[in-house]
Image (tube, grey):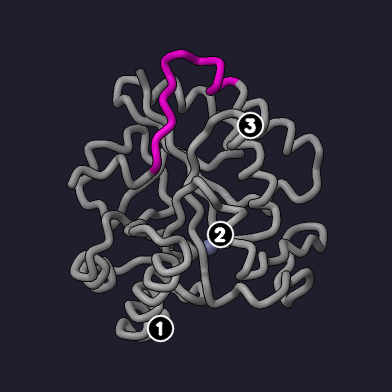
Amino acid sequence: MIRVAQCWDDGVLNDIRVAELCRKYGAKATFNLNPGFHLKSRRLTEGWVYREGYCPGRLAWNEVASVYDGFEVASHTMNHCNAGEVDDRVFIEQSVGARNVLEDRFGKPCRGFAWPCGRYTPETMQLLREAGFAYARTTENVAQVLPCEDFMAFHSNCHFMNPEFWNIFEAAKPCGVFYFWGHSYEMMEDPKLWREYEEKLQRFAADPDVEWVNVVDLVAD
Ligand SMILES: [Zn+2]
């Protein structure tokens, strides 16, 4: 048996598609959100563009509860500020603030965290620990995610588009956990990339040894 977890960052419009595919194949997922970026209506254009001029867009605040219904959500700070680049006090206010807003909206504990841009410092790790976060995901990759030396720097196995994805999955089997992450906007509107993601979910669904778990479930209390 191998426990499999995935998470997706930034609360963009393509998360709708990821959530629908996960429902279709019975997959669990955690979405790391920036509540400060969700306005009354969807943001279809903003200063930020991804490759080929693709604008990821943000969900409207009043639709996040339905889009992510049944999934885990976690703090990614209010406004995607980077540890070490803003005052530590501002950073922790942003981190806890997002958690409070998410717990209010979703009506359940949201104890997870993902470091914006993968940036973290010993000081901010300590502050998140003191604030009661269960884990804080980095963008670093390790062959075996558990045991984890410090859950305030919780590494995953790989990015979802890693060409070695299935080899990394096989190599993670002795550990009993495989954990990957990404941004749904990286698939843009590219049918090939969406098909490849769906094929991953299909393959997990067809594997009797795979058990989907939420990221927070990997953290021992
Ligand atoms: Zn991010």
The picture places residue 192, in percent across and down from the top left corner, at: 78, 35
Extent of the magenta region: 203-214
Residue 204 belongs to the span the image colors magenta: yes
Question: Which amino acid lies under the numbered mark 3 shown in the image of this protein?
Answer: Lys
Q: Position of residue 2 (x, y in %)?
A: 37, 23
Q: Which mark is residue 105?
A: none
Q: Residue at x 60, y 27 (%)?
A: 200
Determine which residue is flagged by label 1. 86
Question: 38 or 197, which is in the foreground?
Answer: 38
Q: Which residue is mark 3?
A: 24
Above/below status of 107 relative to 131:
above
Q: Quadrant of the N terminus?
A: top left
Label 2 SS: helix
Q: Is residue 47 left or right of residue 101?
A: right
Q: Amino acid at mark 1?
A: Val
Measuring 50% from the left and 15% from the top, which residue is drawn there? Answer: 207
Left or right of residue 163: residue 176: left
Is 148 rendered above or below residue 64? above
The residue wearing badge 2 is: 65
Magenta region includes residue 180: no
Q: Callout 3 environment at 10 Å: few (<14), some (14 to 19), or many (20+)?
A: few
Give the x, y percent position of residue 209.
41, 15
Could you say where residue 123 lies in the image, as x and y percent from the top left?
Answer: 24, 73
